[in-house]
Amino acid sequence: MSSPLPALTSPFKDKYTTLPSSSSSPSIATSDMHVSALTHVQRPQNPTFISQSSRGVASLPPVNSSFPQSTASLNHTPGNEDASWSLDQLQKFLDLPENAAAPAPNQLAESGTDVMASEDHDKKTDWHEWADDFINVPDPDWSRVLDDTNVLDSKLKVSKQQPQFHQNQPAPHGEFSSNAYPSSTTPTKPRMRWTPELHEAFLEAVNLLGGSERATPKGILKLMNVEGLTIYHVKSHLQKYRTARYMPESSEGTSEKKVTSIEKMKSIDLKTSIGITEALRMQMEVQKQLHEQLEIQRNLQLRIEEQGRYLQMMFEKQKKVENEKSGAPSSALDEAPSPLSGLNHLPCNNDKSDSEALHQDKSRIGIDSGNAGSKNEKGTADVSMKQKALETESTHHVEKNDDESGFPVLKRARTEK
Amino acid sequence: MKFGKRLKQQIEETLPAWRDKFLSYKELKKLVRLISSAESPEFGKADAGAEFMYLLNNEIDKFNAFFMEQEEDFIIRHKELQQRIKRVKDTWGPGGTKPSEAEYKDEMAKVRKDMVDFHGEMVLLVNYSNINYTGLAKILKKYDKRTGGLLRLPFIQKVLQQPFFVTDLVSKLVKECENTIDQVFPVEVEAEIVKEQREAITVAGKGIFRNTVAALLSMQEIRRGSSTYGHFSLPPLDLPDSDLIHSFQLNSPITTV
């Protein structure tokens, strides 16, 4: 989906620097985003690119947006860990070569998307070959890596405590990057988005190899045979898996644990076992409600933005028409803005320009859909039903809007859609 | 200002490991103010926009990384819980290898608790996603308002596609979890007894329950009508059990383990 693209742009840039720099971005903002996205990806990361993009295709629908997503998984940008932005940091940023990666970022992103879109889950592509290339690194390096992994395994057997995992983690990874990835300079964390299906494949491989204790990352990787999956991903996933397994294991069956759990129960002042269940039920209820509300909210947010996009499109069309008519406003223009204008008593009004006015129009329509949404929230968890009701219940909007915000409703504009 | 305060509250009440993963709303707001007032030649509109986006992109990276990490954990734990239930049934259950009602009851109680907490954690992740999105939308709106830029619309479109905002998988896991829980919970007790016990009961759960209550109430507060109601604002929240939920927050017996 979105994560693959920024990593894409960097290696692509190396290969296709001769692409014409025709940018189709409509605003300054977009090209700025490209700039920031590209400056954000600081080093050529072939492994990153492979794992992210291929994985992205396999698990998510292709992205059609022309905006490169700058989720280049550089989690540890120095200085940005603490939350206080200072002018110093801004200055630092200003010093960065802003135009370094400017050439046709849009083009790169789109060509990348096209390539990805045409790729199926298990088709062999160039990326697969590249993936193979760095997996099949000369043996001595791998055996060294495996030794480290085995050391890790044995350490895990010895102690089942979590801190151990974290301590062991940096060492193997450090060696990893210098041996297995001669091209990259940092042990970057190419972000893999796991899915239940992928996890199932992982589990199968682990079981075939004799369980979580015996299975090694390399073995798992080979068995799984998933394009774009790196040994790094498998390693970290294996670690998580082992942690997850050990936690419940230690709480099952031992009498020691039973005692502590009973004490826990006493400390939270419960009288009967039915009491716990009821407490849990209550907790569930609240949690379910929160989830429901979140889903509703998310859908509303999506629709609001959708309408915003639609209006923006309409606005741009009108601008075109206006330009073509060379200044003199046509009758069409007269009609269209009038129902949309005259909202100058909006509390959030900026009376500045046409674009602002239209912005407000979008918000008005946003309110309509928003209010309808809230009306329909009662009782129904079915969002699709709500959406339908939204389209038809325009009269309700009038009352609600008048009560709350005190301005007339664009009923006409709303129902015309 | 209301959102900032609410966000801060939620961050305070959230699970400790999550505290630094939220949006740096306050700082970004300060930055916007700085940008709009500076207006010096070196700080041209385009530059300011670029920096601002750079920072926002960093935030987004942060969200994505954290979100996907948690998601991965959830996938693993979800599967493990299912297998655990199966193991318990197969060992101590009626048709199991060493059937024992006491053990079975005991283990299932633990499983139930773990499942409910797990469910709660997942929902809190969805909440995390949403509140960060809301914050981003707000900060973008502020930016556009103050600098007259047109950053908001295209940028938010991009945000909509980010992994951290696409919470479908987690939501699906939540629903599956709910189904499993329904199967694993005993039949509902009489309504009166339930009501009595609700008062006497205190709930533990690593602060998850408290978090959830806080999150729900926060959402309600954030969506209350404000002075700037209008621009892409969400309508007020309509919580069915609002009073009950409020009472959860005020009750002192609610302890967290």
Image (spheres, rainbow, N blue to C red):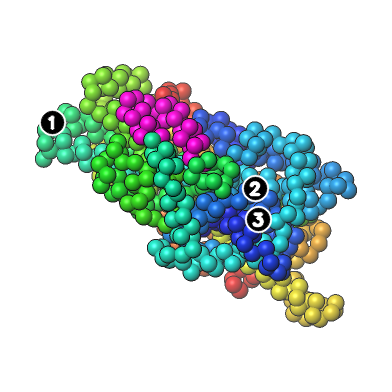
Residue type at mark 3: give it. Answer: Phe
Q: Is residue B1 magenta?
A: no
Question: What is the C-alpha distance between the residues marked 2 and 3?
Answer: 21 Å
Task: Look at the image and say whether residue A168 sits in the magenta stretch.
Answer: yes
Residue at left offset 26%, top offset 25%: A272
- Tag nearer the camera, 3 or 1: 3
- Which kind of residue does numbered mark 2 sit on? Gln
Q: Residues within 10 Å of mark 3 (few under 14, many from 20)?
A: many
Q: How far apart are marks 3 and 1 (CA)?
A: 59 Å
The residue identified by callout 2 is A42
Q: Is mark 1 on a helix, strand or loop?
A: loop
The label shown at residue B100 is: 1
Residue A21 location in percent, x, y? 72, 67
Q: Residue visible at 55% across and 33% down?
A: B19
Residue drawn at point x = 75 percent, y = 50 percent: A97
Q: Residue B155 carries which label?
A: 3
Q: Closer to the observer: label 1 or label 2?
A: 2
> SS of the residue at dot 3?
helix
Q: Which quadrant of the figure contains the C terminus of chain B? A: top left
Residue A288 visible, this angle: no
Magenta residues, start to end: A148-177
The residue carrying pointer 1 sits among few (fewer than 14), some (14 to 19) or many (20 or more) residues within 10 Å by Cα, namely some
Work out whether A208 lies above or below A304: above
